[in-house]
Image: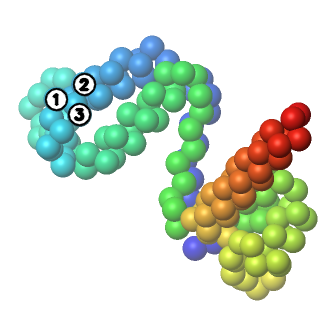
């Protein structure tokens, strides 16, 4: 798969008031029925068979609606999606040349399709987690050093 199959909702493109009402109703329902693994959604006018959705999909929808209610945008990307180097660099907020150095150093796995590098979203997220952990450790060490020096 060389094409990222992502769905983006721009900030403000969903009515915040409607999203807020919907997320409250979904959360109330999920709390009332914690044992249900599927959720049936019936139309307002009845007559049709209800739509049956997996609980996890409804939880994801609630998250999206909660973000929309706050005026935020949301992007949904499958974990197996493959990103171009530019897409991956944008997600890490780094330059493309810097990302390529990370790839060539073995920091992030990638595969070649012809001359083009592809990075899975999962691998990119794993790198981000490792990098964040390194940064936290470094910050903790600086804080301890600062305390020892009385700074």
Image spot of residue 81 (x, y percent): 57, 65
Q: Quadrant of the C terminus?
A: top right
Residue 96 in the figure: left or right of residue 92 = right
Coloration mode: rainbow
Residue 40 in the figure: left or right of residue 66 = left
Image spot of residue 28 (x, y percent): 24, 25
Q: Identify the residue under disc 3.
A: 30
Tell me if label 1 and label 2 are in contact, CB under 8 Å. yes
Tell me if label 2 and label 3 are in contact, CB under 8 Å. yes
Residue at position x 26%, y 45% from top?
Answer: 55
Residue at position x 73%, y 47% from top?
Answer: 140
Q: Identify the residue under disc 2.
A: 28
Residue at position x 16%, y 29% from top?
Answer: 32
SS label for mark 3: helix
SS label for mark 2: helix
Residue at position x 76%, y 78% from top?
Answer: 106
SS label for mark 1: helix
- Rendered view: 131 above or below 64: below
CA neighbours of label 1 inside 10 A, class few (<14), some (14 to 19), many (20+)? few
Do we see residue 143 in this rendering?
A: yes
- Residue 11: image quadrant is top right
| Residue at the farthest left position | 47
CA neighbours of label 2 inside 10 A, class few (<14), some (14 to 19), many (20+)? few
Q: Identify the residue under disc 1.
A: 32
- Residue 84: image quadrant is bottom right
CA neighbours of label 3 inside 10 A, class few (<14), some (14 to 19), many (20+)? some
- Rendered view: 44 above or below 114: above
Residue 57 in the figure: left or right of residue 73 = left
Image spot of residue 149 (x, y percent): 88, 41
């Amino acid at each position: 798969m060389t094409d990222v199959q992502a769905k983006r909702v721009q900030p403000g493109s969903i009515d915040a008031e409607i999203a807020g009402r919907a997320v409250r109703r979904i959360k109330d329902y999920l709390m009332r029925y914690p044992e249900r693994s599927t959720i049936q959604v019936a139309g307002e006018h009845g007559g049709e068979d209800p739509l049956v959705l997996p609980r996890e999909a409804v939880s994801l929808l609630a998250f999206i609606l909660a973000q929309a209610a706050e005026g935020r945008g949301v992007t949904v990307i499958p974990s197996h999606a493959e990103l171009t180097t530019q897409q991956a660099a944008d997600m890490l907020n780094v330059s493309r040349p810097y990302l390529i150095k990370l790839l060539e150093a073995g920091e992030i796995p990638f595969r070649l399709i012809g001359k083009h590098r592809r990075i899975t979203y999962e691998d990119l997220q794993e790198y981000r987690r490792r990098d964040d952990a390194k940064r936290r450790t470094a910050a903790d060490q600086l804080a301890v050093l600062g305390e020892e020096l009385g700074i």
